Image: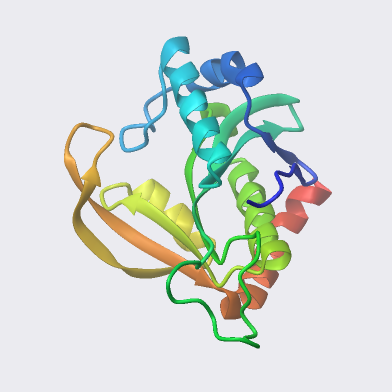
């Protein structure tokens, strides 16, 4: 299981999700819920408490690493995100002896998802810097082979944000899971590979730099 971390940027700090921020998350989620149609964002304290508790249980199993997003400009919690589907490529088909791809206590691949932001933090650069911090950690600290992103195929806003990170559309999986709006959703799958990271990193660095100078 990878060690839990705090990821700090100039305007964003990703802090370990905890029960202590439940009320902050409720406040963030309640600002304006019009953009949450396709995203599961708890609406009240009981739902948020269950949401955080479930995330922490998955963290304890080594399956996820959830964060609360602190917007440093306002010094408040404005949303959440997480690494999930952490896969260590262990099992009945290990790498051969002497392989350059040893299995250790860090993931071989990971997803980034369950991201949502308060209305006041949307379109501010908070999401871009958050993703830059997470991708940097995944590729440069863990050394993962792939980071995956998923979105409801109808969620054009989320898909545009993923595509702006330099992720490639792999395809659409039909009837992949239950949608947040009580439908059966088709899911768009995106990914960034380790070999693509240097180019993606340069692009995101150029986007984050003006935010840092602001």
Q: Is residue 51 above or below residue 198?
A: above
User: Whole-percent x and y of residue 69?
Assistant: 64, 35
Q: Is residue 100 left or right of residue 180?
A: right
The correct choice, above or below, for 115 with respect to 207 in the image is: above
Task: Determine whether, in the image, residue 65 is placed left or right of residue 53.
Answer: right
Tell me where residue 197 sits by quadrant.
Answer: bottom right
Is any atom of residue 93 visible in this view? yes
Q: Is residue 28 above or below residue 104?
A: above
Question: How is this picture coloured?
Answer: rainbow
Residue nearest the observer in this picture, 180 or 166 = 180
State the residue at coordinates (37%, 32%): 40
Residue 6's place in the image compared with 107, above or below, is: above
Image quadrant for the C terminus? top right
The x, y position of residue 128, in whole percent, is: 61, 51
Place residue 189 in its image quadrant.
bottom left
The structure residue drawn at horizontal position 31% and vertical position 38%, both measured from the top left corner, is 38
Question: Which corner quadrant of the image does residue 125 belong to?
Answer: top right
User: Could you say where residue 110 lies in the image, as x and y percent from the top left?
Assistant: 52, 59
Q: Is residue 30 visible?
A: no
């Amino acid at each position: 299981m990878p060690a839990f971390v705090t990821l700090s940027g100039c305007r964003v700090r990703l802090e370990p999700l905890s029960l202590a921020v439940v009320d902050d998350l409720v406040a963030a989620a309640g600002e304006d819920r019009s953009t949450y149609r396709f995203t599961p964002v708890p609406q009240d304290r009981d739902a948020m408490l269950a949401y955080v508790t479930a995330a922490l249980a998955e963290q304890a199993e080594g399956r996820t690493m959830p964060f609360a997003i602190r917007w440093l400009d306002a010094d408040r919690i404005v949303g959440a995100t997480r690494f999930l589907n952490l896969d260590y490529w262990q099992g009945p088909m290990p790498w051969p002896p002497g392989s350059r791809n040893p299995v250790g206590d860090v993931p071989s691949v990971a997803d980034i998802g369950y991201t949502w932001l308060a209305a006041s933090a949307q379109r501010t650069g908070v999401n871009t810097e958050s993703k830059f911090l997470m991708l940097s950690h995944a590729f440069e600290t863990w050394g993962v082979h792939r980071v995956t992103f998923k979105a409801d195929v109808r969620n054009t806003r989320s898909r545009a944000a993923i595509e702006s990170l330099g992720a490639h559309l792999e395809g659409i999986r039909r009837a992949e899971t239950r949608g947040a709006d009580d439908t059966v959703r088709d899911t768009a799958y995106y990914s960034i590979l380790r070999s693509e990271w240097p180019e993606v990193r340069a692009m995101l660095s150029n986007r984050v730099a003006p935010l840092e100078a602001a």
